[in-house]
Image (tube, grey):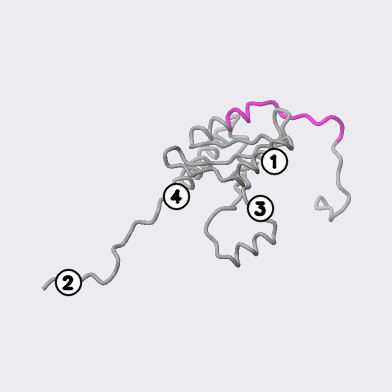
């Protein structure tokens, strides 16, 4: 007598190619920082914006109330270079495993570009490395005169 299967066959979890490649990018950038390379200087000032992922409606609403915005780029480089204020990098996996770029992501890149930031879509690890190398090779943006300081808020320097 044959056993009858009562449960659905187990399917493998979908692979997060984009997440894996972005981790590899940050690992590479860390290594470059440890080596003291020019592009490695971006490591201490580069951060990921965790906007993506599956969330239930309640969590999504809570995050939105806290200021989470749809389409914000994956990585931000908080260093002014080449006359730009910083860099917003939308990261996608290497084709053909890349996801489509959402309209909100294109809108965010356009908004950043209009406001004087570098705004780049990078498809894959190698393209993202090339973007970071190019950006960090630009001269530092110089500020004319002494920067203004805000007086509102608590002075964290004390």
Identify the residue at horizontal 58%, vertical 41% (top origin). 90
Can you identify the residue that label 1 sits on? 111
Horizontal side of residue 129 vs 142, given as left or right: left
Confirm whether the magenta stretch covers residue 104.
no
Residue drawn at x 58%, y 29% as measured from the top left: 133
Location of mark 3 (residue): 69
Q: Residues within 10 Å of mark 2 (few under 14, many from 20)?
A: few
Circle 1 residues within 10 Å: few <14, some 14–19, many ≥20: some
| Placement of the N terminus among the 4 image quadrants | bottom left
* Disc 4 versus disc 2: nearer the observer: 2
Estimate how packed mark 3 is, as few (under 14), some (14 to 19) or many (20 or more) residues with alpha carbons within 10 Å.
Answer: few
Q: Position of residue 104 (x, y in %)?
A: 62, 47
Residue beneath the point at 65% across and 43% down? 107
- Real-space CA distance between mark 2 and mark 3, rounded to the nearest whole angstrom: 51 Å
Pointer 1 or 3: first along the chain: 3
**1 and 2 marks in contact (CB < 8 Å):** no
The rendered magenta stretch, by its main secondary structure, is classed as loop
Q: Nearer the viewer, mark 3 or mark 4?
A: 3
What segment is highlighted magenta in the picture?
132-146
The CA span between labels 3 and 4 is 22 Å
Q: Which residue is mark 4?
A: 16
In the rendered structure, which disc, 1 or 2, sits on the residue that comes first in sequence? 2
Residue at 86% across, 44% down: 149
Height in image: 12 above or below 118? Answer: below
Q: Are marks 4 and 2 in contact (CB under 8 Å)?
A: no
Instruction: Name the residue that disc number 2 marks.
Output: 3
138 left or right, relative to 144:
left
Q: If you read the primary sequence from the N terminus, does the residue marked by circle 1 or circle 4 appear first?
A: 4
Residue 155 horizontal/vertical position (percent): 84, 53
């Amino acid at each position: 007598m044959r056993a009858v299967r009562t449960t659905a066959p187990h399917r493998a979890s979908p692979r997060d190619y984009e997440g894996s490649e972005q981790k590899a990018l940050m690992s590479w950038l860390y290594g470059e920082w440890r080596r003291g390379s020019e592009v490695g200087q971006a490591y201490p000032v580069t951060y990921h914006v965790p906007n993506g992922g599956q969330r239930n409606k309640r969590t999504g609403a809570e995050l939105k109330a806290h200021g989470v915005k749809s389409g914000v780029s994956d990585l931000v480089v908080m260093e002014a270079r080449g006359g730009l204020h910083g860099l917003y990098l939308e990261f996608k996996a290497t084709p053909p495993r890349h996801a489509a770029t959402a309209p909100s992501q294109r809108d965010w890149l356009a908004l950043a570009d209009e406001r004087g930031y570098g705004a780049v879509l990078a498809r894959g690890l190698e393209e993202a490395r090339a973007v970071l190398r190019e950006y960090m090779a630009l001269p530092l943006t110089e500020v004319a005169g002494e920067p203004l300081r805000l007086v509102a808020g608590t002075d964290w320097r004390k």
